[in-house]
Amino acid sequence: MPGSIRVARLFGIDINIHISWILIFFLVVISLSETIYPDQFPQWSRQKSLVVSAVTALLFFASVLAHELAHSLVARRFRMSVSSITLFLLGGVANLTREPPSARAEFFMAAAGPFTSVLIGVAGILVALSSDALLPTVPSLQVVGAVASYLGEINLVVAAFNLIPGFPLDGGRVLRSAIWGIGGDRTRATRIAARGGQLVAGFFLLLAANFFFGFDLQVFGVELGPNQVQGLWYGLIAYFLFNAATQSLQQERLTNIVGTVRVGQLMTTDVRSTTSGTMIAGLIRDLVLPMNLRAIPVLAGDRLIGLVTIGDLRKVEQDRWSITPVDES
C-alpha cells in the first residue's frame, strides 16, 4: 500500500504502518484521554489519563495486528502466500498474493480473524472482572481493569463488525465461501457477496447522512442524533466498503476473461529491431511512425545491447535526430 513504512517482521511477514494509521492512533488516544477515561475515573490526573490512553491505544492496535496475523497464518496453512500486513485508517489488511484455492480454505482463513478478536475480547473482559473483584485489596489493579475492559469490549465490536456479511469484510468472505462450497461456482459466490458489500456500504452511508443532518432515525430501538464526527467515520467506512466490493467484482470479471488465456496468445512474435549506430531519424522514419512501435530492441550483431523507447527519443532535440545514433538516446 503506497504511503506505508515497514516497522517489523513477524513469522516472515512484513508489518507495515500506513501514514493514515498515525491519525487514527492519535484520535483513539484523544478519545480515551479526553472523554472515556475521565468520565469513568474522574479522580485520575490528566497526565495519568493520557499515559493510560496511549498504552491502551497501542494494545488495541496490537490486537488488530493479531487479528490480521490469524488470517495470514491460516492462509499459509492452505499454501497461500502473504506478502505483508498493513495497519491503516480503518484497521488492518493482510496482502495475499493470490485468491484462496477452495471454499474450505477461504472459510477458515476468513473466520480466523474474528475468532481471534473474540478470544482477545473475552480474555479482556475476564481480566477486567477479576481486577474489579480484587480492587478493594489491590487498588493498583484499577488501571489494569480499565485497559482490559476497553480492549475486551472493543475487540468484540471489531469481531461483530467484521462478521457483517458484506464482501470484503470477513463475514462477506465467510458468505462467499458458503455459497461457493454449496454451488461450486466461485464467480457467482463473489458476485452475491460483493453485492452484499455494496448494500452494507449503502446502509453505512445512510447512517452517515443521519449523523450529519440529524434525521429522525432509529436502529434496533436506538435513537441516532446529529454527530458530525461519527458521520464522517461512517462515511469513510461506506466509501471503503463500496470501493472494495466494486473492485472485487471487476477483478473477478477480469479473471474470468483472461484466466484461461495464455501469454503466447497476447504477445507479439513479429519483433522489429534496429542496429547499433542507426540514426534516430532513420529509426523514426522506418519503424516508429509506420509501425507505431513504442519500444525497439537495439542489436550489435546477434547480441542485444539495449532497448530504445519513445520516451528516450523524446529526450533528443528534433534537429539532432539525423546526427544522433540510437546508442546515445
Image: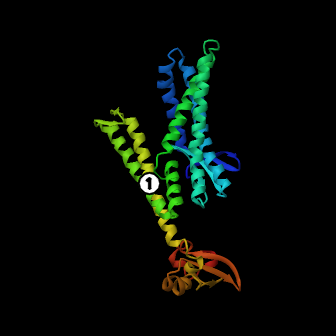
> In the visual, does 55 lie left or right of 178?
right
Residue 23 visible in image: no
> In the visual, does 72 lie left or right of 174?
right
Against 268, residue 108 (above or below) is above
Along the viewing direction, whichever of 327 and 189 lies nearer the viewer: 189
Q: Residue furthest left?
A: 216
The quarter of the displayed image where residue 229 is located:
top left
Give the residue displayed 60% in from the left and 18% down from the top.
Answer: 133
Give the residue displayed 52% in from the left and 34% down from the top.
Answer: 154
The colour scheme of the drawn protein is rainbow
Give the residue displayed 54% in from the left and 41% down from the top.
Answer: 21
Q: Which residue lies furthest to the front in this view?
A: 182
Numbered disc total? 1
Residue 97 placed where, x, y %? 61, 59
Along the viewing direction, whichever of 190 and 280 lies nearer the viewer: 190
Against 66, residue 152 (above or below) is above
Give the residue displayed 50% in from the left and 29% down from the top.
Answer: 30
Number of residues whose C-alpha sits closer than 10 Å to that of mark 1, classed few (under 14), some (14–19) or many (20 or more): some
Residue 120 placed where, x, y %? 60, 35
Against 53, residue 200 (above or below) is below
Residue 187 visible in image: yes
Against 12, residue 292 (above or below) is below
Residue 24 placed where, x, y %? 51, 38
| Amino acid on which disc 1 is placed | Asn
> In the visual, does 201 lie left or right of 61?
left
Residue 95 placed where, x, y %? 59, 53
Q: Residue furthest top?
A: 137
Q: Mark 1 points at which residue?
A: 243
Q: Is mark 1 on a helix, strand or loop?
A: helix
Quadrant of the drawing holding the C terminus:
bottom right
> In the visual, does 177 lie left or right of 73?
left
Along the viewing direction, whichever of 94 and 20 lies nearer the viewer: 94
